[in-house]
Amino acid sequence: MNIVMMTNTYKPILGGLEKSIEVFSSEYRKRGHHVLIVAPEFKDASQREYGVLRVPAIQNFNGTDFSVELPVPNHLFKAFKKFRPDIIHTHHPFLIGDTALRMSAPQNIPIIFTNHTLYEKNTHYVPGDSKAMKQFVVRLATGFANLCDHVIAPSQSVADLLISRGVRTPVTVLPTGIDVEKFKTGNCSAFRKLFGIPQDAFVAGIISRMAPEKNIVFLSQAAAVFLAKNKNAWFVVVGDGPSLDEIKTIFRELNVESRLVCAGSLKDTQLVNAYHALNVFAFASHSETQGLVLAEAMAAGTPVAAVDAPGVREVVKDKMNGRLIPRDNVGQFANALQWMADLSAAETAAM
């Protein structure tokens, strides 16, 4: 088949959605299908990309590191005519999603939508954010799903949520999955040495985009409290984003900034080493639909401490492979990290 995948975000952004597109497009091609990825222009994007069509976009929308596609269906007609798509798979309901509908309808091309995000958790990027705006976004995403031929939910909890909101289009639960072998072997010692972390330290950390929708401020508050009570503990932040300065301020206010490591964005071997350098992966996002980073952490043998949320509760089982905190509570999360730190090596290995 000829499959068009359309997305508002793509490389060089390295989030879960972008990983999902990479995983599925790679597997489609291995199975003999042809894939064209339609994505916005990014100033740091590679100039040599196989099977990627970049479209004009507004760079650094609203102060973020995202690009936002301009509605340019005419720009795509020529490419679509040449590619002759059998299916259009959109990964967003807004902007590029509207373009996907405009491209599919005249040619009667089936359209699939993957609901990667709880979109109401991201309205802070839009001027005029409010409760009414969040409700409007939910209605808009639900209406879009009902215009598609099929909807993919990355987890059962998200599928249940979509149906409860009024999605009538058939919904299939299809997690992205990860290459487990890629994360099995890493060099904890090398990573700790590179960033000046003692080999015997207890290290908590997060690998994520550092942005408000990831609930980074709450997580940093809990981690800083944990570090203040545990002099052998360190916290590692892997990733970039607009919340980095806030993170540093929180750790500075509790005088534990010297044990905060901001490693920036990592990939390949360095990323795998980062997972292996952690004693616990800390996660507090409420906006995840499947939490790929949680699966990556567990593939590396790293237990997780997380706040309960759709897409998270299916991965993290409390006191079985980590800790699941019922709600945002700084004291409870800090205590969960301490609970992990107090485990014996055998107890940790059993998780």
Image: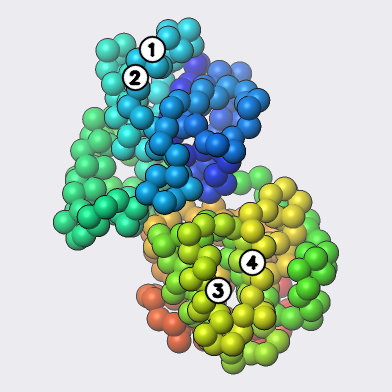
For the question of whether residue 318 can be seen, the reply is no
- Which residue appears farthest toward the left when viewing the image? 132
Looking at the rendered structure, the kind of residue marked 3 is: Lys
Residue under circle 4?
Answer: 262
Looking at the rendered structure, the kind of residue marked 1 is: Phe
Looking at the rendered structure, the kind of residue marked 2 is: Pro
Q: Which mark is residue 248?
A: 3
**Residue that appears at 67% across and 63% down:** 263
Q: Which mark is residue 130?
A: none
Q: Is residue 102 above or below residue 96?
A: above
Q: CA distance from mark 2 to mark 1?
A: 6 Å
Q: CA distance from mark 1 to mark 3?
A: 47 Å
* Labelled pair 3, 4 in contact (Cβ < 8 Å): yes
**Residue that appears at 43% across and 27% down:** 56
Tell me if mark 2 has few (under 14), some (14-19) or many (20+) residues whose alpha carbon lies within 10 angstroms of its own: some
Task: Name the side, left or right, on which 90 lies relative to 10.
Answer: left
Q: Nearer the viewer, mark 4 or mark 1?
A: 4
Residue 8: x and y in percent read 42, 37
Q: Which mark is residue 73?
A: 2
Looking at the rendered structure, the kind of residue marked 4 is: Cys
Task: Name the side, left or right, on which 297 lies relative to 38.
Answer: right
Q: CA distance from mark 2 to mark 4?
A: 41 Å
Question: Under tag 1, what secondary structure?
Answer: helix
Residue 36: x and y in percent read 52, 22
* Labelled pair 4, 1 in contact (Cβ < 8 Å): no
Total number of numbered discs in the rendering: 4
N-terminal-most mark, 2 or 3: 2
Image quadrant where one finds the C terminus: bottom right
Residue 62: x and y in percent read 37, 49
Q: CA distance from mark 2 to mark 3?
A: 43 Å
Question: Under tag 4, what secondary structure?
Answer: strand
* Labelled pair 2, 1 in contact (Cβ < 8 Å): yes
